[in-house]
């Protein structure tokens, strides 16, 4: 490290072919006919994946090689349960589908190359000291923990398909959460400069991201003739997205090295901790949106083998809060097709 003059070596982690991956998963589903009209299908599936190393290369080190300094690994496990109910009320087809996903991702990443960049081009290596303010190894590693869950529900009703005038009506709801933990660690870091409550931590991200979407949708089709059909559809939606928690430095570290007063960290706190064990809350943003999307289709069957059609449809991808909380929300995407 040119600025701080620290030397490091990586014999404790160096090895050949260190980016191995093991994956195991399973799925089971069961169809149950309750009677002539109703069927339920529960299912559950899951997977565990464990990987080591990083899938990258540094040209200066040779083909398919990197020079890293800390153990690198990733453990990704998830399970999803789902239930589908299908049946009839009078001559209307009813479908209900629900699912629950839970996913945990734990990881450790080498960040020493960034530490080298900071030291070389920003001169920041001298910032990282022990309690006696002696310069220490500025190499960093990142502890990551991500917790995801998602609940999804949909209910549809369809009129008889053989009728010349037929329709589909439905409702949809989805709620998902992502708990984000990113801890940047420098071993032996000054106690006065570490994020409060987190030893050897120069930066902490402890946040909860929530995405919620609800919608009502419908479609009507009419056969003008046995060969000519028109379809009109509409979807009314509402989305909500929020991000709250903490990200940044310790306020003593920011003040000691003259960082701007509004630099992310404890000095920008707006309230007590709201997610986990973070020192406080310095991020609490939300955004919401609603609207309608439309679709129109005209189909003509020339004969049993040939068909021509024209379609107009609209697409939508929700906006939301940026992961970097100092930036404003990003806008939604719309598509005319």
Image (cartoon, rainbow, N blue to C red):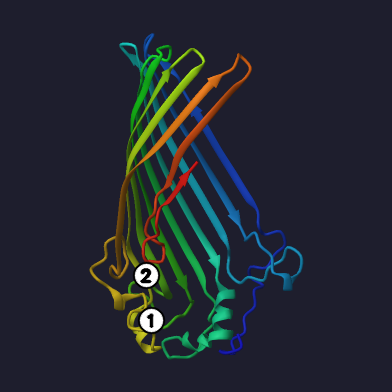
Q: Secondary structure at mark 2?
A: loop
Rendered position, 18 above or below 164:
below
Q: Residue at x 40, y 62 (%)?
A: 322
Residue 134, position in %: x, y?
48, 91
Q: Earlier in the sequence, mark 2 or mark 1?
A: 1
Rendered position, 256 above or below 332:
below
- How many residues crowd mark 2 within 10 Å: few (<14), some (14–19), many (20+)? few
Residue 172, position in %: x, y?
34, 35
Q: Secondary structure at mark 1?
A: loop
Residue under label 2, please give it.
Answer: 326
Residue 287, position in %: x, y?
31, 56
Image quadrant occupied by the N terminus: bottom right
Looking at the image, which is closer to me, 334 or 202?
334
Looking at the image, which is closer to me, 24 or 42?
42
Looking at the image, which is closer to me, 39 or 155?
155
Q: Residue furthest right?
A: 63
Q: Which mark is residue 191?
A: 1
Rendered position, 93 above or below 232:
above
Q: Residue furthest top?
A: 36
The quarter holding residue 183 reads bottom left
């Amino acid at each position: 490290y040119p600025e701080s003059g620290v030397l490091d070596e990586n014999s404790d982690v160096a090895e050949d072919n260190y980016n191995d991956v093991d994956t195991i998963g399973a799925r089971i589903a069961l169809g149950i006919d309750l009677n002539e009209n109703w069927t339920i299908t529960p299912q559950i599936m899951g997977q565990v994946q464990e990987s080591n190393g990083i899938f990258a290369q540094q040209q200066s080190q040779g083909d398919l090689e990197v020079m890293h300094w800390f153990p690198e690994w990733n453990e990704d496990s998830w399970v999803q349960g789902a239930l589908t109910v299908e049946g009839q009320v009078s001559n209307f087809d009813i479908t209900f589908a629900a699912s629950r996903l839970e996913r945990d991702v734990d990881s450790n990443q080498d960040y020493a190359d960034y530490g080298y960049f900071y030291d070389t081009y920003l001169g920041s290596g001298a910032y990282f000291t022990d309690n006696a303010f002696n310069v220490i190894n500025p190499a960093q590693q990142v502890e990551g923990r991500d917790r995801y869950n998602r609940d999804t529900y949909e209910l549809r009703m369809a009129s008889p398909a053989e009728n010349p005038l037929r329709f589909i009506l439905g409702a949809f709801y989805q709620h998902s959460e992502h708990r984000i933990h990113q801890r940047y660690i420098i071993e032996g870091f000054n106690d006065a400069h570490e994020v409060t409550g987190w030893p050897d931590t120069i930066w902490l991200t402890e946040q909860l991201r929530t995405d919620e979407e609800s919608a009502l949708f419908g479609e009507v089709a009419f056969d003008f003739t046995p060969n000519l059909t028109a379809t009109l559809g509409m979807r009314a939606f509402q989305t909500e997205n929020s991000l709250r928690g903490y990200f940044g430095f310790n306020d003593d570290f920011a003040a000691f090295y003259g960082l701007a007063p509004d630099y992310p960290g404890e000095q920008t706190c707006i309230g007590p901790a709201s997610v986990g064990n973070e020192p406080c809350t310095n991020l609490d943003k939300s955004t919401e949106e609603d609207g309608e999307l439309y679709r129109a289709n005209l189909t003509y069957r020339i004969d049993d083998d040939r068909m021509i059609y024209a379609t107009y449809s609209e697409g939508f991808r929700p906006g939301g809060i940026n992961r970097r909380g100092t930036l404003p929300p990003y806008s939604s995407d719309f598509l005319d097709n």
